[in-house]
C-alpha cells in the first residue's frame, strides 16, 4: 500500500513555505496541502500570481519537487452559501479560483465545505438545522438543499470541465456533515466530481464509526485528513451539541477569521470534546484500521495531518501526529 502521508500547512502559517516544508520533511512526510482562501489567509499559496503566470506555477511546483514532495490538495474551507454579502460571495469566488488553480497546477483534489445557507430567502445569517423533529425545520432544509443543489451543480460542472475533484469535508455547521448528507448532495445534483474529504475528527465526536463511514462511501472518498478528537468529561452535562462558547476579545492576537468581522469563538473550559493530536484520542490500532479502509478505496490516497491540538506546540503536535500516523501505516 502506498498511501501518501503528509500535512496541511495551516498550522505552520507562522513561517514561509520552504521552512514549513522542511518541518514536514523532517517528520518523514511527503504529501502537502495548502490553503487557498475561505476562512483563513493563504500565505503558502499566492493565488493571484499563480493564476496569472505559468512561470510562477512552474517555480512553485519546483519548491515541492526539489524536496521529493507532492502538492496533493488545495484547501479552500469556507461557507460559500453564507447569506452575509461579505462572506458567502467571497468564499464562493475563492472556491472557483481554487478549482481553476488546481487545474493549472495539476492538483487533483480541492478540499472545501458544503456551506450553510440561511433559513429562507430573506435570512441574514446562516442557520444550521440539527434535529428537524418539528417539521418546520424540514421546510428550512428543503430551502437549504435547493440552494445547495443549485450552487454545487455549477461547482461540479466547473470541476468536471477543469479535470479536478472537489472533496467536501463533512463538517457540522454545514448542510453536508455526515456520509448520509454527502451522498444526498452527490445524488441530488447527479455529481461526477464531488466527493468526500474524509476528516475523521468531526465524525468521531458525532459518535460515528469512521472506518464504516469510509467503506459506506467507497469511491466517493477522494482525499483524507489525519485529525483526532477526544470525548471529554464535560460530555456528562453538555452532550456533544453545546453552545457554551464565548466571544474572543477584539484585541486577541491569534483570532481565527470566519468572515469579515466574524471570528472563531473560544471553547468552554470543560468541553464535551476537543481536537487532539493523532494517536491521543484513538490509539495506533484505530488509525491503522482507518488507513486500511482508505487504502481499500484508493491505495494512493493522500492522508494529510491537520494539527489543531492546543495542548501541544505546532511543531510538537505535528511531530506526535506524524509519528503515530507512520506507526499506523507500518501495521498495514
Image (cartoon, grey):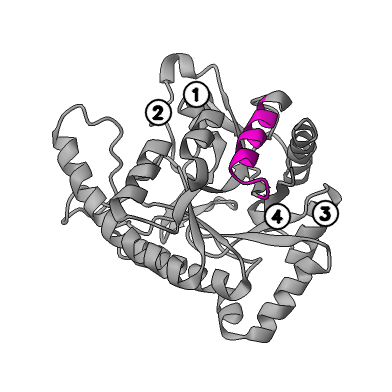
Q: Report the span colored magenta.
A: 286-300
How far is disc 1 from disc 4 in space, using C-alphas? 27 Å
Q: Is residue 52 above or below residue 292?
A: below
- Report the residue at 30% width, 41% height from top: 128
Q: Nearer the viewer, mark 3 or mark 2?
A: 3
Circle 2 SS class: loop
Task: Name the N-terminal-most of marks 2 and 1.
Answer: 2
- Report the residue at 63% width, 69% height from top: 45
Residue 147 x %, y %: 25, 56
Quadrant where the N terminus is found in the figure: top right
Q: Are marks 2 and 1 in contact (CB under 8 Å)?
A: yes
The local crowd at label 3, few if under 14, some if 14 to 19, many if 20 or more residues have their Cα within 10 Å, is: some
Q: Is residue 109 above or below residue 7?
A: below
Checking the image for residue 25, the label placed there is 3
Q: Is residue 291 magenta?
A: yes
How far is disc 3 from disc 2 in space, using C-alphas? 38 Å
Residue at numbered disc 1? 272
Q: What is the number of callouts on the image?
A: 4
How far is disc 4 from disc 2 in space, using C-alphas? 29 Å
Q: Is residue 258 magenta?
A: no
Circle 4 SS class: helix
Q: Is residue 243 left or right of residue 35?
A: left
The kind of secondary structure the magenta stretch mainly shows is helix
Circle 1 SS class: loop
Residue at numbered disc 4? 12
- Report the residue at 47% width, 34% height from top: 216
Quadrant where the C terminus is found in the figure: top right
Q: Are marks 3 and 2 in contact (CB under 8 Å)?
A: no
Residue at numbered disc 2? 242
Task: Name the N-terminal-most of marks 1 and 4.
Answer: 4
Q: Is residue 141 left or right of residue 279?
A: left
Amino acid at each position: 500500500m502506498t498511501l501518501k502521508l503528509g500535512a496541511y500547512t495551516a498550522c505552520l502559517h507562522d513561517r514561509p513555505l520552504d521552512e514549513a516544508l522542511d518541518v514536514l520533511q523532517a517528520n518523514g512526510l511527503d504529501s502537502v496541502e495548502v490553503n487557498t482562501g475561505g476562512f483563513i489567509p493563504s500565505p503558502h499559496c499566492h493565488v493571484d500570481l499563480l493564476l496569472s503566470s505559468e512561470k510562477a506555477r512552474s517555480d512553485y511546483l519546483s519548491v515541492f519537487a526539489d524536496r521529493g514532495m507532492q502538492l496533493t490538495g488545495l484547501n479552500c474551507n469556507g461557507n460559500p452559501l453564507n447569506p452575509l454579502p461579505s462572506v458567502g460571495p467571497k468564499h464562493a469566488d475563492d472556491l472557483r479560483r481554487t478549482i481553476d488553480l488546481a487545474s493549472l497546477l495539476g492538483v487533483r483534489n480541492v478540499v472545501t465545505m458544503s456551506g450553510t445557507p440561511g433559513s429562507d430567502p430573506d435570512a441574514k445569517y446562516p442557520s444550521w438545522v440539527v434535529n428537524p423533529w418539528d417539521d418546520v425545520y424540514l421546510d428550512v432544509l428543503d430551502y437549504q438543499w435547493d440552494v445547495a443543489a443549485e450552487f454545487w451543480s455549477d461547482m461540479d460542472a466547473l470541476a468536471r470541465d477543469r479535470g479536478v475533484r472537489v472533496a467536501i469535508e463533512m463538517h457540522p455547521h454545514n448542510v453536508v456533515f455526515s456520509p448520509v448528507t454527502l451522498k444526498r448532495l452527490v445524488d441530488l445534483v447527479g455529481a461526477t466530481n464531488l466527493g468526500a474529504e474524509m476528516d475523521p475528527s468531526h465524525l468521531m465526536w458525532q459518535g460515528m464509526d469512521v472506518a464504516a463511514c469510509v467503506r459506506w462511501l467507497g469511491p466517493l472518498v477522494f482525499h483524507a485528513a489525519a485529525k483526532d478528537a477526544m470525548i471529554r468529561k464535560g460530555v456528562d452535562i453538555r452532550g456533544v451539541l453545546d453552545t457554551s462558547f464565548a466571544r474572543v476579545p477584539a484585541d486577541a492576537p491569534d483570532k481565527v477569521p470566519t468572515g469579515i468581522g466574524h471570528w472563531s469563538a473560544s471553547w468552554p473550559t470543560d468541553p464535551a470534546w476537543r481536537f487532539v493530536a493523532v494517536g491521543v484520542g484513538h490509539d495506533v490500532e484505530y488509525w491503522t484500521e482507518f488507513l486500511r479502509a482508505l487504502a481499500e478505496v484508493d491505495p494512493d490516497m493522500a492522508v494529510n495531518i491537520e494539527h489543531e491540538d492546543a495542548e501541544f506546540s505546532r511543531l510538537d503536535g505535528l511531530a506526535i501526529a506524524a509519528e503515530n500516523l507512520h506507526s499506523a501505516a507500518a501495521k498495514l
